[in-house]
Image (cartoon, rainbow, N blue to C red):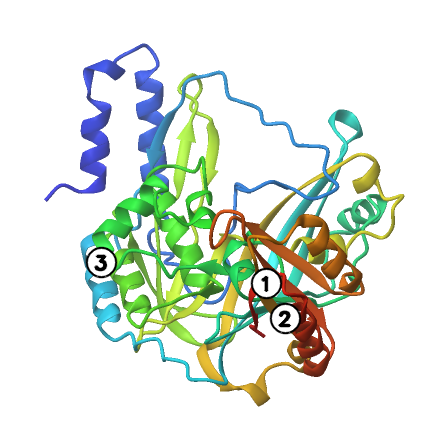
Amino acid sequence: MSTEIDLVRDFMKVDEWSGPDLPRARSSLVEAIALELANGNNVRSGSGASPRTHRRSRRSVRWSIGITTVAAASIVIALLVVPSARRPSAPAAAAEIARLADAVPPVPPLTAGEWYQYQLQGELSANVTTGSGTSATSATADIPIAIGEWSNATGAVCTSQQFGTAAFPSSANAQAWQKMGLVATPANQPAIGCSAGLEATAVARGTPVGPINVANITHDPSTLAAQLANGATGINEIDNYATGEPARVVGFLRLTDLLVGPLEGQWSGFGQEMLNTLSLLPGISALGTMTTHAGASGLAFSMPKQVTLNPNNGAETYAFTPPTVILDPQNGSLLEARNLDFSILQSAAEDFVGGPSALVYTQGVGYGLTAQWVDPVSGLQVIGASLVPSWITTYHVIEAVTAPSATASQLEGLINPFLGNGNSAFSNDDVPGAGQSTYDITIMGTATTAQNFANTLIASGLFTSVSVKL
């Protein structure tokens, strides 16, 4: 059986790569392999996160003036650094994951009045830059985060995301953070919200009500593995995730994002399907037993570090360490994910801004976020309505479908006076049919307040149906 080293050696012998720089590239490869083998006795263990040499994601927030992307002019050769010989081979890792998949319990069903609860905790590494060129200011901070999601059988989804106080690796980073007009302890925490009806499936992830909807995902692991690699799952949040990352690992990145969630629309065998898909991804390696930040022991899996070298001088131009997932050795559930690009709530991010005079407003800002680690507080749980957070009881969503004869001015005159002070309206035109619109109207307050508004909509005669979704 060929090893990864054999495959790379054969690749380097191909005639098309026999130019004058080939000896230097081969020399760099030999050095990389020697270094990896020298480190083979130091198998990763414990709770320490692996160091990251490349921050993969840079996102523009609402106040951003844009981020410049620089394209490399030189041709580079990508080399896959082989894993330590002490770690199980990819086939062995796949078999181990497939065994765990067989032990995954089904997603429990919901009955009327029950809710799914899913909670995460972790720590983000944030890098923020404002300005450009010699006037640019950059700072790095570690930020605790807590996430909660609750969804019920009627399709209502409520989400909470809360940042803790930022910690800085040095006083220089703390001063740069302050210089940009950012505060260490964000205001208005947590960022919360609820949605239901069409709005719950239409909103983009990254809002307070935007978990990934997996209701229409394929149930065939081999098909899903190919769709993840090609960005063809039909789930925009997943297909657009990790765009531009190495083709060898992009399927693993997207699947890890699904494993972490939060999600909605899971079917009974969803967890088993995810692990069976993971076992089919090429290049998966087992890292042995690791301990999570919550103190649990699990089986860790990842992919080898991806390295790109400049063929002219052998210098490393790109290094990317894929995330690590730690699974429960008994039932395959996710215990922890490390080194994962992470989406955050827009409103939560803005709560770090100290005021309108901050440089992030006047000069624009870019930021990159990586979850150093994120742990589910518990797996997906079924709870009664009395156990959901009390703030959820103040959100009420009414879904109303307009009559074809209703005019825009009539609808605005009826709905607009109720908006503001937390009340809002989401509309989807030509749904369920041409000339109709579906409104999901969020009313804050008591259930009686929401029902009175629903009665007003019914009495207007402008709607064919009115229902309280939450």
Sequence-wise, the earlier of marks 3 and 2 is 3
Marks 2 and 1: in contact by CB < 8 Å?
A: yes
Residue 416, image x, y percentages = 76, 58
- Tell me where residue 106 sits by quadrant: bottom left
Residue 16, image x, y percentages = 23, 14
Q: Residue at x 39, y 65 (%)?
A: 326
Label 3, label 2: how many angstroms apart (C-alpha)? Answer: 57 Å
Give left or right: position of 266 versus 396: left
The residue furthest top is 20
Query: Which structural element holds mark 1?
Result: strand
Sequence-wise, the earlier of marks 1 and 3 is 3
Q: Residue at x 36, y 50 (%)?
A: 252
Give the vertical position of 387 relative to 298 (above or below): below
Residue 442 at least partly seen? yes
* Label 3 sits on residue: 94
Label 1, label 2: how many angstroms apart (C-alpha)? Answer: 7 Å
* Label 1 sits on residue: 463
Give left or right: position of 373 versus 442: left
For discs 3 and 2, the disc positioned in front in the rendered view: 2
291 vs 181, nearest the viewer: 181
Give left or right: position of 202 versus 409: left
Amino acid type, label 2: Ile
For discs 1 and 3, the disc positioned in front in the rendered view: 1
Give the vertical position of 15 relative to 413 (above or below): above
92 vs 361, nearest the viewer: 361
Residue 338, image x, y percentages = 48, 58
Badge 2, how many Cα within 10 Å: few under 14, some, many 20+? some
Sequence-wise, the earlier of marks 1 and 2 is 2
* Label 2 sits on residue: 458
Give left or right: position of 282 versus 214: left
Amino acid type, label 3: Ala
